[in-house]
Image (spheres, grey):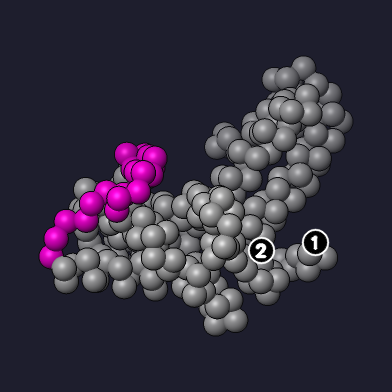
Amino acid sequence: MQRVGSDDPAERARAFELLVRAYWRPVYKHVRIRHRRDATEAQDLTQGFFARAFEKGYFASFDPDKARFRTFLKVCLDRFVIESARAEKRLKRGGGLERLSLDFEVAEQELQIVESAEPEAVFDREWVRGVLGAAVDALQRHCEVRDKAVYFEVFRDYVLDDEQGTSYRDVAEAHGLSVTQVTNYLSWSRRTFRRLALEHLRELTSSEEEFRDEARALFGEDVAEEG
């Protein structure tokens, strides 16, 4: 995330786009739950927060020696929401910038079935989902351009689908493969998925220590050997 303070406008914009993709769902749901704003207000605040952060360079002052970036972002967000309430005026969506394309309808549907209304837990869970979701998308693209689409299909059917009790043999029969092929495809896909998730995580963190801490949050183990 050091690139959000880059002097290169293109580099800064790319870093900010990456940041928005990773954090807009946690931000929206945090505003809905912690600050008890209705859906429309939360949408305005989410749009306004990122627009203001980009315009004013909120994140350029982040110090990875003091906190994780997602902790720092929440502090900035809470301050922004409180200040907007004091101003007693509705925020303009986008804050003068091009409006962000965010699927608030889907996020709101997800919020209706959330099991825990604890703001910190929801924010952190959404952050994890965002990182892993980006890795799934990256894996699919990675497979497609290498003519390994069936690898992703096997990964999707066995790892991602909610079907209970799916076996290697079930997946093999569904795709006309042998069980040995399914075993090999899953092994490759899992390794590649993990690597892509860690690559994405590196782009979202500002130091090796933060990267390792967040990697443990994702995978529950030390990944120092992957640095």
Q: Nearer the viewer, residue 187 or 10?
A: 10
Q: Secondary structure at mark 1?
A: helix
Q: Amino acid at mark 2?
A: Ala
Label 1 belongs to which residue? 226
Q: Which mark identifies residue 215?
A: 2
Q: Position of residue 59 (x, y in %)?
A: 47, 68
Count of numbered labels shown in the rendering: 2
Quadrant location of the C terminus in the rendered image: bottom right
Magenta highlight: main SS: loop
| Residue 63 in view | yes
Marks 1 and 2 sit apart, C-alpha to C-alpha, by: 10 Å
| Furthest residue toward top | 176
Q: Is residue 218 left or right of residue 54?
A: right
- The relative height of residue 39 versus residue 49 in the rendered view (above or below) is above
On the image, the x and y values in percent for residue 23 come to 46, 55
Give the class, few, some or many, for how many residues have Cα within 10 Å of label 1's Cα (few <14, many ≥20). Answer: few
Q: Which residues are magenta?
A: 88-107
Q: What kind of element bears circle 2?
A: helix
Check if mark 1's residue and mark 2's residue have beta carbons within 8 Å: yes
Amino acid carrying mark 1 in the image: Glu
Q: Is residue 217 left or right of residue 101?
A: right
Check the image and name the residue furthest to the bottom.
66
Percent x, y of residue 6: 57, 63
Residue at point 39%, 65% (across, down):
56
Q: Nearer the viewer, residue 102 or 35?
A: 102
**Quarter occupied by residue 82:** bottom left
Q: Does residue 30 show up magenta in the picture?
A: no
Q: Is residue 126 visible?
A: no
The quarter in which the N terminus is drawn is: bottom right
Residue at image position (65%, 53%) is: 200
Compare marks 1 and 2 and give the one earlier in the sequence.
Answer: 2
Residue at (53, 54) in percent of width and height: 9
